[in-house]
Image: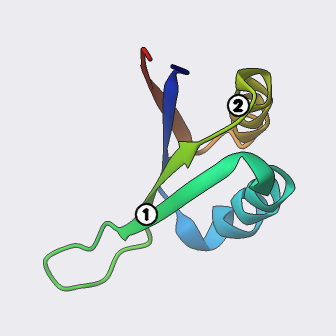
């Protein structure tokens, strides 16, 4: 059974970062099985922050390339979880 990879991407400033993140996610779309976005709203319902969770499938070398490319956007945080198969 293959490993299960989950990537979490935190965007502290969605307006500034969204287009670059979207470009990279589209580029690696063939390894993204599930994408789940969460807006990190403040108490008043407004915030420029966001969180994206990705379930990845396929070749782990592609996952590493995706993660490395996301890291070129200095203002976002990228974390991973890898579950053994």
Q: Vertically, is 72 above or below 27?
A: above
| 3D distance between C-alphas at marks 2 and 1 | 21 Å
Residue positioned most to the front: 1
Query: Seen from this angle, which residue lies furthest right?
Result: 27
State how the image is colored. Answer: rainbow
Question: What residue would you read off at disc 1?
Answer: 50
In-front residue for pair 81/44: 81
Count of numbered tags: 2
Residue 78, image quadrant: top right
Q: Residue at x 70, y 57 (%)?
A: 21
Q: Where is residue 43 in the image (x, y as percent from the top left)?
A: 13, 77
**Residue 5: x %, y % from top left:** 51, 31
- Residue occupying the point 43% across, 63% down: 50
Sequence-wise, the earlier of marks 2 and 1 is 1
Q: Label 1: state its secondary structure.
A: strand
Tell me where residue 71 sits by quadrant.
Answer: top right
Residue at image coords 55%, 21%? 2
2 vs 1, front mark: 2
Position in image of residue 82 (x %, y %): 45, 21
Q: In this view, does 73 lie above or below 24?
A: above
Residue designated by label 2 = 63
Give the residue at the far left of this rendering: 43
Does 9 appear above or below 39?
A: above
Measuring 35% from the left and 75% from the top, which residue is drawn there? 47
Residue 35, numbered circle: none
Q: How crowded is mark 1: few (under 14 residues within 10 Å), some or many (20 or more)?
A: some
């Amino acid at each position: 059974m293959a490993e299960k990879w989950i990537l979490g991407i935190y965007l502290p400033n969605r307006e500034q970062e969204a287009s670059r993140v979207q470009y990279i996610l589209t580029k690696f779309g063939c390894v993204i099985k599930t994408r789940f976005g969460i807006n990190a709203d403040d108490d008043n319902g407004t915030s420029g922050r966001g969180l994206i969770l990705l379930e990845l499938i396929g070749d782990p070398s592609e996952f590493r390339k995706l993660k490395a490319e996301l890291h070129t956007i200095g203002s976002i945080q990228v974390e991973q979880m890898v579950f053994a198969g």
